[in-house]
Image: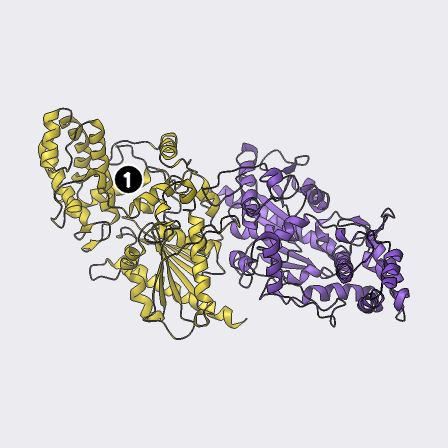
Chain colours: A purple, B yellow
């Protein structure tokens, strides 16, 4: 794969990994179901996108999962890929889309796939890529299922408060006192850690791998907790799952079971919080101690942090009143300073809306934007139809891209219905493509 | 302007030239009429796109003419821009489109243009860019007048013979014997130049700046003539004009006036050909001698030759039977060899159709594709409606982007009508944009 699809100056190439399964593939012109990989090892997405596997037999489809450059094993400059800006600077969404276009064209160059319609699937950032590849290359991709794709989570489009309010609302739904107690806990943590005795108490009782030493450690602990609450809301699935961490069904409910008694305070509250958080950090009961540096076991964290410092500037903030978090305004100057320090790049908060559009997407066609209302990322999702064939599907009871997961007996009815809707549109897009192809 | 819009590795910038005229601009939210510059000095296009100037008062529009990178004064690396592939490799259509998007966003960032609709105009390659910028950035550009834009003149889409058949047909329309005599002339040239005496006769009588010495010189002479015939067809305007050269009205007719007598042969035929060709080479009567190295006074010839060796691989061929040219098949291998030799690049004949689409453009909206049927480039033009708002306008009596030129008393009625159609659609696009903006 060319490292740079947009010049003739850089001629380096690399190996892009993709997974392919032809078990259910029809003999002729089989539809290609193509997952536009996001920030992580592609195996994770192949394992967590059961919907594609579930429907492949019905459509006789070929399954393809393409890895996003700079993640997993798809390193443009092997071990040097992250060495400096010269090597890392080709980590952009547009280059990744071109990788996928190239791969699709490569597949289609084989006689058996010459007339294969291509349907793309993606969740979260992968869903953004699915929507964008259909918008930019409608002649190559016939339709897109863009699940939980926050393509509107950008400056000047979506208010930064929205995201953490949804997290808070999820906890409130689990138990009205739960977010109140979490909000209360911040000051309790500050108070107890104001002296060495308190720091030791907390470090010992919470089994921190490294005891708290100073204010900066305490701040890290708080941000660690905030990340966990957010992740819990994101993967609040109706059954046991292991996406960001091994978790029970409806983990937010499980957490909030420990946080119902409004009178909890002081060390009692902190003990309850620790129990609650252990649902996320130690559901397997194998964690020996809490490592604050390894808080949210995110996907390709380093790569994403670079993308967030360049194109993917998605403002998130809290006011501590309408949400349960510590008040934290969105500060682009500080954000920029950090990015310059870390990667020598300046974030470009308007780039995504300039490249792909945000406010006027009325020309988009053949895209389903599905969003779960329990998913904090629905704050930046497309929640209204853009056109007659670029439509919004709202799944009230769903967390982050639940519809892309395998069907499960515990699925709420709304996600069962959403998947039916997806299948209906996929079939329609394939038929339209075949009709058009006939007339050539 | 960033040299590379698609990475964070190359951070060089340069000055992109653009011309701006606000004489007729309304005070508020004036439409921006934006010419997407093609392969040449932007002043040439500003001077030859009178249609934009003619209609600016009626729309109260701001006029903007943006120069294409690597042409005119818009050199990314000043004198080194053409030095080697490392510097030249950023000469691509996608980078140019991004230049225009950036410039539009820069203009729109000013309060007076905040709600300005943007209509793009372009002829020929500039028309391709106009169509493509609307396809790729419909959230930024509200509509496009793509005149004589051969977006289908690519491998596997349009037959390579079509182009020169149209040239031939133009000459045949002028006089049925004209293309026959031109076809006859090739062998006469070969015969007479087979000995030194003949070479001298031709060099003297045709006033060549450098006398013919060998077969390669003769081949160059023939290719020189072929280019002139082609250019004559391209700019076969109904009035005196100076686009590729100073020329009389309907220059093909003027040329063919010398080529009506079917019995012309030998040196008599060559004398007639010379007279005919002089219409193109010496209409001003100031040319002292014919310089075969400077045949077609094309626009930015060097830059275009690089683009033709990378993205813009537009196959043109002749069979000498259905056209008046020497038979010359399209040979990609030879073409590639030349490109590798000249620029160390391999042509990518499928790139344009992959990037922008060729066969399935049914999702395009708000584009007028206008083509003159006398224009050889109409061979690769869009001659059928793509959708209800991406429509084809056929101008039977028109040469290359005549509709973009100033109105003239000698204009055929079909071009007058085409311009009315353009104005109707421009008004519609502007109104639709204003309606949509109101609802925000």
Up-down relation of residue B66 to residue B151 (above or below): below
Residue A139 on image: x %, y % = 51, 47
Residue A129 on image: x %, y % = 59, 51
Left or right: where does residue B199 sit relative to residue B91? left
Left or right: where does residue A284 sit relative to residue B71? right
* Of the pair A16 and B318, the residue shown nearer to us: A16
Left or right: where does residue B34 sit relative to residue B226? right
Residue B85 on image: x %, y % = 41, 40
Q: Which residue was labeled with disc 1? A: B165
* Of the pair B313 and A330, the residue shown nearer to us: A330
Up-down relation of residue B222 to residue A253 (above or below): above
The chain holding disc 1 is B
The image quarter in which residue A15 lies: top right
Q: Tell me the quarter of the image containing the C terminus of chain B.
A: bottom right
* Of the pair B303 and B215, the residue shown nearer to us: B303
How many residues crowd mark 1 within 10 Å: few (<14), some (14–19), many (20+)?
many
The image quarter in which residue A187 lies: bottom right
Residue B386 on image: x %, y % = 44, 52
Picture residue at 32% right of the left edge, 43% below the top: B302
Up-down relation of residue A73 to residue B418 (above or below): above
* Of the pair B71 and B118, the residue shown nearer to us: B71
Q: Is residue A141 visible?
A: no
Q: What is the secondary structure assignment of the residue under circle 1?
A: helix
Q: Tell me the quarter of the image containing the N terminus of chain B.
A: bottom left
């Amino acid at each position: 794969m060319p490292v740079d699809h947009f010049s003739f100056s850089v001629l380096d190439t690399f190996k892009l990994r993709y997974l392919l399964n032809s078990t259910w593939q029809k003999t002729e012109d089989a539809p290609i179901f193509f997952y536009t990989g996001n920030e992580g090892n592609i195996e994770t997405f192949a394992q967590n996108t059961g919907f594609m596997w579930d429907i492949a037999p019905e459509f006789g489809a070929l399954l393809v999962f393409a890895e996003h450059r700079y993640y997993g094993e798809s390193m443009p400059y092997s071990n040097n890929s992250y060495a400096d800006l010269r090597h890392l600077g080709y980590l952009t969404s547009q280059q990744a889309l071109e990788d996928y276009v190239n791969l699709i064209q490569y597949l289609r160059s084989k006689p058996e796939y010459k007339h294969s319609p291509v349907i793309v699937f993606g969740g979260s950032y992968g869903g953004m890529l699915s929507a964008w590849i259909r918008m930019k290359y409608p002649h190559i991709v016939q339709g897109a299922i863009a699940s939980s794709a926050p393509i509107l989570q950008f400056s000047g489009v979506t208010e930064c408060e929205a995201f953490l309010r949804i997290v808070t609302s999820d906890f409130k739904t689990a138990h009205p006192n739960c977010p109140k107690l979490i909000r209360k806990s911040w000051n309790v943590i500050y108070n107890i850690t104001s002296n060495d005795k308190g720091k030791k108490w907390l470090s010992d009782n919470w089994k921190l791998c490294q005891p708290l030493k100073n204010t900066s450690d305490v701040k890290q602990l708080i941000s660690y907790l905030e990340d966990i609450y957010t992740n819990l809301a994101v993967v609040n699935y109706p059954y046991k799952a292991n996406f960001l961490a091994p978790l029970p069904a409806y983990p937010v409910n499980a957490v909030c079971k420990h946080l119902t008694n409004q009178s909890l305070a002081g060390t009692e509250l902190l003990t309850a919080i620790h129990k609650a958080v252990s649902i996320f950090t130690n559901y397997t009961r194998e964690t020996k101690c809490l490592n604050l540096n390894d808080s949210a076991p995110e996907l390709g964290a380093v790569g994403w942090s670079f993308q967030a410092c360049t194109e993917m500037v998605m403002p998130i903030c809290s006011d501590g009143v309408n949400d349960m978090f510590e008040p934290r305004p969105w500060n682009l100057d500080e954000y920029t300073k950090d990015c310059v320090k870390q990667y020598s790049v300046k974030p470009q908060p308007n780039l995504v809306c300039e490249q792909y559009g945000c406010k006027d997407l009325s020309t988009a066609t053949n895209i389903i934007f599905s969003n779960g209302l329990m998913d904090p990322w629905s704050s930046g999702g497309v929640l209204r139809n853009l056109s007659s064939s670029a439509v919004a599907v709202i799944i009230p009871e769903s967390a982050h891209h639940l519809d892309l997961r395998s069907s499960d007996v515990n699925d709420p009815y709304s996600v069962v219905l959403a998947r039916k809707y997806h299948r209906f549109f996929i079939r329609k897009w394939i038929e339209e493509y075949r009709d058009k192809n006939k007339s050539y």
